[in-house]
Image (tube, grey):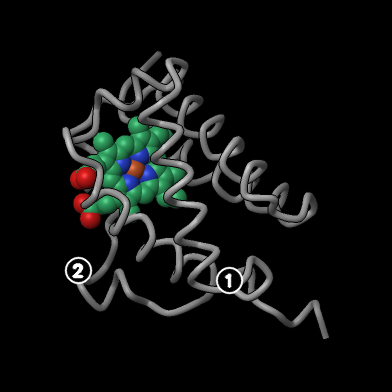
Amino acid sequence: MADEQTPFERLGGEGAVRALVDRFYDLMDLEPAYAGLRALHPATLEGSRDKLFWYLCGWLGGPNHYIERFGHPRLRARHLPYPIGNAERDQWMVCMAQALRECGVEPKLAEALRQAFQGTADWMRNRAG
Ligand code: HEM
């Protein structure tokens, strides 16, 4: 039954997760609206692409590539070196929403993922404002 599929399967497996992550970072690189978010990242985004891809595979209910490589994600701790407030969280969310749209993710699934990302993105904030 469709309801028993994981979000990873509904999205279309590893190829679809990789395409979403690649679109997300392409947009971050290209769109002036995400320049603040881009500036927090390293000069080259190749490592960031791989890490988010590995992380999201597991987060969506697919293979645990990230944990196999790095252990427990400790995601909030790993973000502490970067100042993340409301503006950075919102740019991350808008960039991801645009990537979900442009990758043609089915609207009901895209909305469910957007809501789930919102919780994680809120939790990542480490400074006021
Ligand atoms: C809320 C706004 C966010 C900002 C400003 C932000 C920014 C960053 C930055 C600057 C890095 C370092 C990139 C690198 O080491 O190449 C990073 C790493 C990472 N981010 Fe975020 N991030 C945000 C939210 C999220 C969310 C919501 C997720 C997951 C759903 C996520 C997942 C990751 C992962 C998996 C890494 C790699 C961690 C590591 O192994 O070092 N981030 N993020």
Q: Quadrant of ligand 1?
A: top left
Q: Is mark 2 within 8 Å of ligand 1?
A: yes
Label 2 SS: helix
Whether residue 46 sits left or right of residue 114 in the image: it is left
Residue 110: assigned label: none
Three-letter code, disc 1: Phe
Point out the image quarter for the C terminus.
top left
Residue displayed at 48% across by 36% down: 122
Point out the image quarter for the N terminus.
bottom right
Question: Could you tell me residue 22's position as x and y percent?
Answer: 42, 49
Question: Could you tell me residue 67's position as x and y percent?
Answer: 28, 73
Does the image show residue 116?
Answer: yes
Q: Earlier in the sequence, mark 2 or mark 1?
A: 1
Question: Could you tell me residue 28's position as x and y percent?
Answer: 40, 31
The CA span between labels 2 and 1 is 20 Å
The residue carrying mark 2 is: 70
Quadrant hosting residue 6: bottom right
The residue carrying mark 1 is: 8
Whether residue 111 sits left or right of residue 19 in the image: it is right
Does the image show residue 124?
Answer: no
Up/down of 105 relative to 68, above or below: above
Up/down of 24 relative to 8, above or below: above
Instruction: Give the label, 2 or 1, closer to the camera.
Output: 1
Which residue is more in the foreground, 21 or 119? 21
